[in-house]
Amino acid sequence: MRALVVVGLLGVLALVFVVVALVRDTQGNAGIAGGCPEGWPLADVTLREPKDVKINVLNGTDRVGLATDIADDFRNRKFQVKKTADEKKQIDDIAVLRYGPKGVGSAHLLRAYFLDNAEYDYDPKRKDDVVDVVLGSGFQQLATTTEVNQSLGDLGAPVAPAESCPMTDKN
């Protein structure tokens, strides 16, 4: 009987400790744009579903029709392909993802389709939520659904780029 009283008392003390810790939490607003320096853009760090991601597919290789073929692959995966075109200069990388603050979460999802082997070109002044996917000469194919899911697990949650703040519902 005495053991039950001790266990009950320890349970109450633990509960009080947790409540006090939560009330006194000074990191409750950590990562929230409330403390964002003036002039820094608010980055949309919401991980998007493919159906909510807008992309332009650009061919940065000498392979004719690559952008059109890969745009079809993206459409089959439910992405919103806005346009396809040839990039002015060829790139050697697998791909380059160009995006602004409103495209951070979308670009994060797209990283998984290239198994985190794409280069990133973040432009804090860009105003739209479209991500430019520039295919390079190192590109072979998009990752499979299983590979994408594994890659997303490895990548974790989207984070705001340097010198930007995460957008929240309070902004």
Image (cartoon, rainbow, N blue to C red):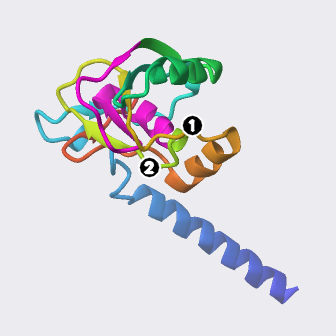
Q: Residue at x 50, y 52 (%)?
A: 155
Residue lying furthest top: 82
Amino acid type shown at disc 2: Asn
Amino acid type shown at disc 1: Leu
Q: Which residue is mark 1?
A: 142
> Magenta segment, which residues?
84-111
Location of the C terminus by quadrant is: top left
Q: In the image, residue 113 lies at what x, y percent?
A: 54, 39
Q: In the image, residue 167 lies at what x, y percent?
A: 34, 33
Q: Is residue 65 above or below residue 103?
A: above
Q: Is residue 87 above or below residue 105?
A: above
Does residue 110 appear to the left or right of 11 in the view shown?
Answer: left
Q: Secondary structure at mark 2?
A: loop
Does residue 127 appear to the left or right of 19 in the view shown?
Answer: left
Viewer-proximal residue, 118 or 151?
118
Q: Is residue 85 above or below residue 50?
A: above
Q: Residue at x 38, y 25 (%)?
A: 59
Q: Which residue is mark 2?
A: 117
66 within the magenta span: no
Quadrant housing residue 154: bottom right
Residue lying furthest left: 38
Q: Residue at x 20, y 41 (%)?
A: 36
Q: Residue at x 54, y 20 (%)?
A: 69
Viewer-proximal residue, 153 or 70?
70
Asked whether the beta carbons under mark 2 and mark 1 sit within 8 Å of each other, the answer is no
